């Protein structure tokens, strides 16, 4: 299953945005209001939970400055990646688009597509207001 957020404009250079997203503690600022848990568990990993959803642990998998940051699920139960594609627009502005990729059975994909899409949009909206 592949999902994409809208491309949003961010008032940071591509390098600044890449550095921001490479620091996992900054993801707390991007989370939806209905977050029930956010905890940094290692320098490169965090766990979060939204109300009514199971906890999800993510870790940094790849950083390609200044254009890409990839997070991946720590658990093999729900294998997926969340990546940010960053493009420089000017010295102080960049665009970002989030991509979710995961392998799920048809039933699971049907159940999580809506919540994941909404989650991606919330993250990208919060990115645009940085």
Image (cartoon, rainbow, N blue to C red):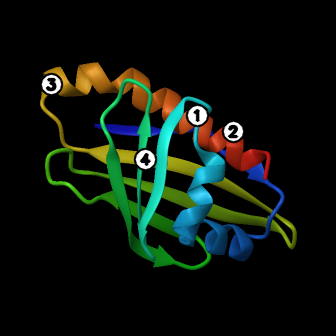
Q: Depth-wise, is mark 1 or mark 4 nearer the camera?
A: 4
Q: Residue at x 40, y 61 (%)?
A: 71
Give the crowd class for mark 1: few <14, some 14-19, many >=20 residues within 10 Å: many
Give the alpha-carbon distance from disc 1 to disc 3, as whole Å.
22 Å
Q: Which residue is mark 4?
A: 48
Horizontal side of residue 130 vs 82, given as left or right: right
Q: Which residue is mark 3?
A: 106
Residue 14: mark: none
Q: Secondary structure at mark 2?
A: helix
Mark 1 vs 3, N-terminal side: 3
Give the crowd class for mark 2: few <14, some 14-19, many >=20 residues within 10 Å: some
Give the crowd class for mark 3: few <14, some 14-19, many >=20 residues within 10 Å: few
Q: Residue at x 43, y 47 (%)?
A: 48
Q: Which residue is mark 2?
A: 125
Q: Secondary structure at mark 1?
A: helix
Give the alpha-carbon distance from disc 1 to disc 4, as whole Å.
17 Å
Q: Secondary structure at mark 3?
A: helix
Mark 1 vs 4, N-terminal side: 4
Question: What percent of the width, then of the height, locates residue 21?
Answer: 59, 65
Q: Residue at x 52, y 66 (%)?
A: 24
Q: Residue at x 46, y 29 (%)?
A: 117
Q: Quadrant of the N terminus?
A: top left
Q: Depth-wise, is mark 3 or mark 2 nearer the camera?
A: 2
Mark 3 vs 2, N-terminal side: 3
Q: Secondary structure at mark 4?
A: strand
Give the alpha-carbon distance from disc 2 to disc 4, as whole Å.
18 Å
> Height in image: 65 above or below 90?
below
> Height in image: 124 above or below 60?
above
Q: Which residue is mark 1?
A: 121
């Amino acid at each position: 299953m592949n999902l994409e957020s809208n491309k949003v404009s961010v008032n940071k250079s591509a390098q600044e945005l890449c550095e921001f997203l490479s620091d996992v503690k900054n993801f707390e600022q991007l989370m939806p209001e209905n977050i029930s848990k956010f905890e940094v568990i290692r320098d490169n990993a965090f766990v979060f939970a939204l109300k009514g959803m199971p906890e999800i642990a993510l870790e940094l998998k790849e950083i390609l400055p200044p254009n890409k940051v990839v997070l991946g699920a720590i658990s093999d139960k729900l294998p997926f990646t969340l990546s940010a594609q960053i493009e420089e627009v000017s010295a102080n502005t960049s665009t970002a688009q989030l991509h979710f990729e995961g392998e799920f059975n048809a039933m699971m994909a049907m159940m999580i597509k809506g919540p994941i899409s909404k989650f991606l949009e919330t993250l990208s909206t919060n990115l645009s207001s940085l």
